[in-house]
Image (spheres, rainbow, N blue to C red):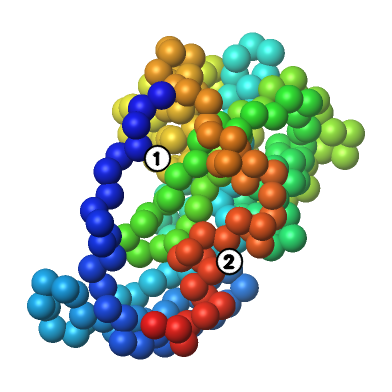
Amino acid sequence: MLNPLPHPANPNPYTVHSRKLVYDCPWIRVREDRFTHRSGAEERLYAVCGFKREACGVIALDGQDRVVLVGQWRYPLEIYSWEIPEGGGEEHESPFECMRRELAEEAGLEALVWEPLAFFHTSNSSTDEETFLFLATDLKALPQGHAPEDVEELMHLREPFENCLTRVLSGEITDSLTVVAILALHAKRTGHAIDLPATLTERFFQRPSEHPSQGRARWGNLESL
């Protein structure tokens, strides 16, 4: 086990003067914070995007070591993307509950064995989004099949894990959840990964309200500077 990485004695260099909510919808919210930096910089603006749902994904492996992939058009990038089943966890759902639902809806599957695989922040320079990734095995097809949302057109593919690793490293697969999941499992298989700490693992099975990060909790208290 490695020692924790060092932190400075006073890690936060910002003095916040105001916070203003400028956009709010069921999925995201955006605010503008005005701050000064202890370096002496003049007052500046920081735009923060808050995600109301937790990002969740699962690398589901069948008995032939093939990864279940879902293909869909990604509107912001205007490209077609192959990726693991993933989705946004609702406020009342744990990441585990979210991914059981998403695996059923997107792929028409359930898994009998689930394991927390990785946790990361998707883009910490501008968002507070947290991501929970699972490994799922012993897959079973659901009688009713998959049930995508009314704005989803999905393709399905089972791709050998080694092929997925090559596609990630070549830049063919670029979805961040898929990239991290594939590399995390590769690290685990080659002896370069350790078990997640218990305090982190339990968050995979808790609702967001049971483990709010400081950044995500901030949205309920924008007036406090």
Q: Residue lying at the far left in this picture: please name it.
A: 40
Q: Residue lying at the far right in this picture: please name it.
A: 143
In the depicted view, which residue is nearer to us: 25 or 53?
53
Image point (62%, 46%), residue name: 203
What kind of residue is marked 2?
A: Lys
Residue 170 visible at all? yes
Quarter holding the N terminus?
A: top left
Q: Give the Cα distance between marks 2 and 1.
A: 23 Å
Q: How would you rate the neighbour count of disc 1 (Cα within 10 Å): few for under 14, some for 14-19, many for 20 or more?
A: some
Count of numbered circles on the image: 2
Q: Mark 2: which secondary structure?
A: loop
Residue 210 image position (x, y, % from top left) = 66, 57
Image point (48%, 64%), residue name: 214
In the depicted view, which residue is nearer to us: 89 or 105?
89
Q: Mark 1: which secondary structure?
A: loop
- Which mark, residue 52? 2
Residue 162 visible at all? no
Image point (43%, 12%), residue name: 190
In the depicted view, which residue is nearer to us: 91 or 104?
91
Q: Nearer the viewer, mark 2 or mark 1?
A: 2
Residue 137 image position (x, y, % from top left) = 69, 22
- Which mark, residue 174? 1
In the depicted view, which residue is nearer to us: 65 or 41?
41
Q: How would you rate the neighbour count of disc 2 (Cα within 10 Å): few for under 14, some for 14-19, many for 20 or more?
A: many
Sequence-first disc among 2 and 1: 2
What kind of residue is marked 1?
A: Thr
